[in-house]
Amino acid sequence: MDDDGGRRSKVQRLYDACDAVFSPGKKGAGGLPTLTRIRWLQDILDGMEAADVGIDDADAGGGEEGERRSSSDDEASPRAPGRRRLLSTRGFTGITYVHIHECDDFSMGVFCFPAGATLPLHDHPRMVVLSKLLYGSMRVSSYDWVAAPRSGTSKGGLAKVVAVDELREAPCRASVLFPRSGGNIHTLTAVTPCAFLDVLAPPYAEELGRPSTYFSDIPVPTLPPGYAVLEEELPEDFRVVGAPYIGPELVVHMDLYD
């Protein structure tokens, strides 16, 4: 689907593909992207490295080599006449989010974790989420709702276990989760310093019924193995800080579907 020949940066190719898959009028029947197109995006993500989004993976042995990769890959970018400066994550003491792009249809960004940091159990209501672990390793526990919780003052219900402390180590295949399958509710813990590139489609929007909700796993001895009761719970002392995106510049398409 992409015969560009390498003239665009990798992050531009990802943006263009997301726009083609998730923007109105470009989806499959019923307004949903086809599985073939989701796999196309997954393949694009599989080819991406930390330097492609302006991040130094020195803790994983990237460093100078990563800088050279970014420079050669993005030589067509007007912001990259020579070597590109990379964002160092070595001093990050908490979870940090590097915002790349957001529109009504999808968002792109990178979460950077110091070793031991945990993103609490949370959901992705009515979203498709693709994630590529750029460097490092993490453990993932995830669930899918047996029945979607009803809207109200609180959310919760019976969920099926998808993964328990699943170890993911870079390089590995980009993961995909869907609104009702694939581990839509998950928690992530960094085993080593790590970073992952996230595509959310559509992004969180509380006013549109897509809030970010956190949960806790409630022990229920009578439940059969593989199931859990999740209840909404706001985590204490949890926050994500922001860092600037300094990767290749994006050429953003005008929305013709307003």
Image (spheres, rainbow, N blue to C red):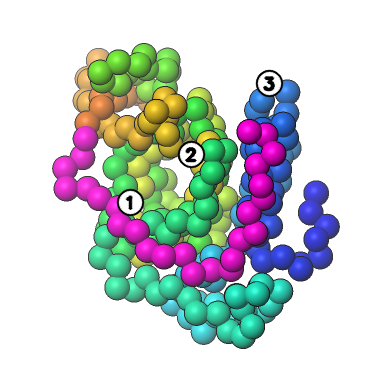
Q: Which residue is mark 2?
A: 203
Q: Give the prevailing secondary structure in the magenta stretch.
A: loop
From what the image shows, is residue 121 above or below residue 119? above
The amino acid sitting under disc 3 is Gly
Q: Secondary structure at mark 1?
A: strand
Asked if residue 248 is among those painted magenta in the image, a careful observer would answer yes
- Mark 3–mark 1 Cα distance, whole angstroms, equals 36 Å
Above or below 190: residue 83: below
Crowding around mark 1 (Cα neighbors within 10 Å: few <14, some 14 to 19, many 20+) is: many
Q: In the image, residue 13 lies at what x, y percent?
A: 68, 57
* Rendering coords of residue 87 (x, y %): 43, 73
In the rendered structure, the answer to whether residue 40 lies left or right of residue 64 reads: right
Magenta-tinted stretch: 234-258
Residue at label 3? Answer: 30
Please tell me which of labels 2 and 1 falls first in the chain.
1
Decide which of tag 3 and tag 1 comes sooner along the chain.
3
Identify residue type, mark 1.
Answer: Thr
Between circles 3 and 1, the one closer to the viewer is 3
53 in relation to 109, above or below: below
> How busy is the neighbourhood of tag 3: few (under 14 within 10 Å), some, or many (20 plus)?
few
Q: Is residue 213 above or below residue 64?
A: above
**Which amino acid lies under the numbered mark 2 shown in the image of this protein?**
Pro
Which of the pair 247/183 is nearer the observer?
247
Q: Which quadrant of the view contains residue 184?
A: top left
